[in-house]
Amino acid sequence: MAVMDVNFYSSCLMRNVTYRAIIPLSSGVFPGEKGSDREEFKTLYLLHGIMGNYTDWTYSSRAVQLAEKFKIAIIMPSGDNSFYVDNEKNLSFYGEYIGRELVEETRRLLPLSNKREDTFIAGLSMGGYGALRNGLKYSDTFGAVAGLSSAFAVGISSAPDDPLVPFRRRSYFESIFGDLSKLPGSDNDPEALIDNILKEGKKPPRLFIACGTEDSLLEYSRDFRDFLIERSIEHTYHESRGGHDWIFWDHYLDKVMRWLRRG
């Protein structure tokens, strides 16, 4: 098992960035025991939530243990509070960074499979939305997508403005998405992205959606589930007791890893 922090210059973000990588042990545990030359691992790109960073999952969940157990490499980037989308005004293209540049960079450096069926993306809250948005926008790269307690931007940004909560202010969402009236149907709308995939005659990635029944974001996961049913999109959907917290996310990371491993 190797856990490492890697720095590199991102042309999408125009600055040095850091991601954390968890690489399972392939073989050769004892001195003198021969391991494989270069095992290429299935890979999960795992996104944090708002106010988080690339360390969140290793400090607050069993990500390290689960990567080793299921032999799936995990790559954890920082997304700041960007919702993992492209923002031309701020010259920060987080969507392209997650969906293309980070994948290319990690594949060059680490023993990762370059096959779509071995490449996955998941996240929690803001990262759940980011995983769905980028997993669907870059569906030729990602074979499976999981959103936990996903903060669906279309729904949340249309909720009443709450000046007391910074991340519920309309001005905050406008700084990220611009004109919010144009958000539905855009490439920041997971439902529109699925419709585009279907129009192109392609098969969407495998989808896993989960949210706690005590989570204030539950209605958005239910709405997305209903959309998937309406479009006859195969998916896995879970609701269970839990809130918007690490107890729920750690529990479901295990379920996601099992789901990914089954293929």
Image (spheres, helix red, strand yellow):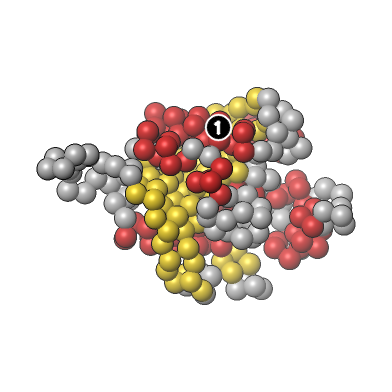
Identify the residue shown where x is 26% and y is 41%. 26
Q: In this view, does 52 lie above or below 208?
A: below
Please name the residue shown 60% across and 73% down the image: 91
Q: In which quarter of the image is the C terminus?
A: top left
- In terms of depth relative to the viewer, which is nearer, 246 or 213? 246
Give the quarter of the image for residue 237: top right
Q: Which amino acid does label 1 sit on?
A: Tyr
Is residue 42 toward the left or the right of residue 10 in the image?
Answer: left
Q: Relative to 245, is 15 on the left or the right?
A: left
Asked which quadrant contains residue 180, the reply is bottom right
Q: Please identify the quadrant where the N terminus is shown.
A: top left
The total number of labels drawn is: 1
The location of residue 209, given as percent across then percent down, is: 59, 34
Q: Which of 152 and 166 is in front in this view?
A: 166
Label 1: how many residues lie within 10 Å, few (<14), some (14-19) or many (20+)? some
Q: Which residue, as the protein is rendered here, is positioned at the far front?
A: 31
Q: Mark 1 points at which residue?
A: 252
Rendering coords of residue 217 (x, y %): 73, 39
Up the image or down, 41 lies above or below 70; here it is below
Q: Where 21 sits versus 29, above or below?
A: below
Residue at horizontal 55 percent and vertical 35 percent from the top: 250
Position in image of residue 173 (x %, y %): 75, 59
At 69% from the left and 38% from the top, the residue drawn is: 244
**Residue 100 percent across, percent down from the top left:** 45, 59
Q: What element carries label 1?
A: helix
